[in-house]
Amino acid sequence: MALKLPRHRRQAVPERDLADSAALRADRYSKEDKGDKPREKNEKGLRWQLPFLALGLLRHMSASSNIIHDCDEVFNYWEPLHYLLYKSGFQTWEYSSEFALRSYLYLLFHMLVAGPTSWFYKDEKIQVFYKVRLFLGLISTITETVLIVALSRKYGKRLATYTLAMLCLTSGCFFSSTSFLPSTFSMYAVTLSSALFLLEKYASAVSVSAAGVLIGWPFSILIFLPVTIYSLIKGSFKKVFLSGLITSVSVIYMLIIYYYGKWTSSIFNLLKYNVLGGGESHLYGVESATYYLRNGFNNFNFSFILALLFVAFLPITLKKYTPDLLVVVSPIYIWLAFMSLQPHKEERFLYPIYTLICVAATAVIDIFPDIFRDRFSTEESFMVKVAKVLRPVFLGLILCASHSRTFSLLHGYSGPLVIYKHLEHHEDASPGSILCVGSEWHRYPSSFFIPSYVKEVRWIDDGFRGLLPFPFNSTLGGTAAAPSYFNNKNRASDMQYLHDIDACTLFVELDLRRPHPSRGRDLSKWETLAAVHYLDRELSPAIYRSFFIPYSWHHKNVFGLYKLLRKIPQNNVDQD
């Protein structure tokens, strides 16, 4: 007979104790791991209306008030667009059919708005200029809205809201969002492809990446590599690969447009010139290796430093944001390293990563409390509570500094746009007038600002020894022309200047009150039709010219005068 041992019944745990234990575990999880896991997918996050309205308002302000930051925007994009619309405008050597480095497909994309607008505003070319800018602002608004929604759904409303504030108010995003440049188009594509990647729409993300490289800027392929590679890994390889391939083939087919009088590929020509041909961009100026670091700080102040620190907190960021956000922001470091090695540097070359800088910076601000959190404590430390308070405070300081920077640039350097707008108010000038521009040729805002009574715009020799743009020559074939005066060595042509200054009817100049003579000071030959203040960068202190500080900005900075002059008829002088 089997021996039966007495059974010891386990003592029952009161239901109240079970509830308290569960609550303690939940509390411990909420305090230790709050925000460390991705948000549940069923959370909707921010709705699209708020970011769309906020970004739309700021992009509208940018379109209407933005200055032109680079003469390349004017002569390589606004002027060819003007020629397609009105059969007049300046041509650069890159658009000579001998070199054919620029794509007309990028211009035709903007013709979707510029064409109908030019028909509606037949005698108001300046309206076409600003309507194209509004179109650019709309694209920026849409792509950035998708990014904000994607961030909110994946990582929560706080990160999305902070990023929205950065996109709206940082100087870099305010100015780049409505610039007519391929690097800006690449920025739109980077923003949208990153958003689609976070939404796990991998095939669409790769398609947008392909379009951004081929329609925008071919060299930006380095920026799209992380999202493209990771999309191929995480998504259906066949579907993602075919999506990118079909988009690439379609765009390449459209790129071979018969505008140069022959079938040619501007992408191949550009790569041939810069890579196979060794490239000679150094002819247009070189900068030190720290140029982009200084430039990034000017446009994003401390948020740029925070963006660079994203990788310094990888143990926290990887746990809180998963590898996906690291994939999205990694192009910042790839692009900065690559571009800093190039001798020729320009501010617009950083445009493609501007939205990513905002994302990386806000992610670092968001993890401030996590840096000080004790992982083995159920109670938050004093430093964690302070860090939570500092998040909005630090963000606010960054945005105030950015807004100050934006105001300084708009108030200090908007003179050229203001002065050229004055031309439309002086139609009493004789038809067939010649507008002359000397050393200020690089601030020429485009032929969209030139009214019909001005017969032509001519350059005056004020000491510049590089190659200047020439008017498109319809006699030689217009877009298909290969004029002999163009070269790819930046050598000046004897034909680029008007040597008889007496033929000038109107003149635009910048008078910085320096010892060298100013034509506007000769009151016997010229009368001033309009003049506005222009900030003298060389004589103004760096802190005051860089940021708009009330009261001090006007008193500490030095200003010159941007002038529109009209030649006094000689018979009037003789009568006096």
Image (cartoon, helix red, strand yellow):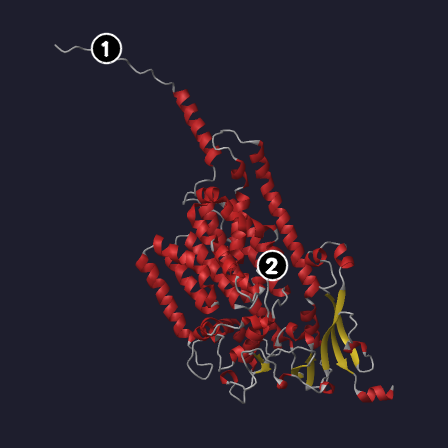
Where, by quadrant of the figure, is residue 245 drawn?
bottom left
Residue 42 falls left or right of residue 280 = left
- Quick one: SS at disc 1? loop
Where, by quadrant of the figure, is residue 407 drawn?
bottom right
Task: Answer whether residue 119 is visible to the viewer in this image.
Answer: no
Closest to the observer, 394 or 199: 394
Residue 54 falls left or right of residue 315 = right
- Quick one: SS at disc 2? helix
Total marks drawn?
A: 2
The x and y percentages for residue 360 are 52, 50
Closest to the observer, 472 or 453: 472
Look at label 2 and name its amino acid.
Asn
Task: Count neighbours of disc 2 (C-alpha within 10 A) and say few if under 14, some if 14 to 19, many if 20 or more.
Answer: some
The quadrant of the image that shows the N terminus is top left
Circle 2 residue: 295
Circle 1 residue: 6
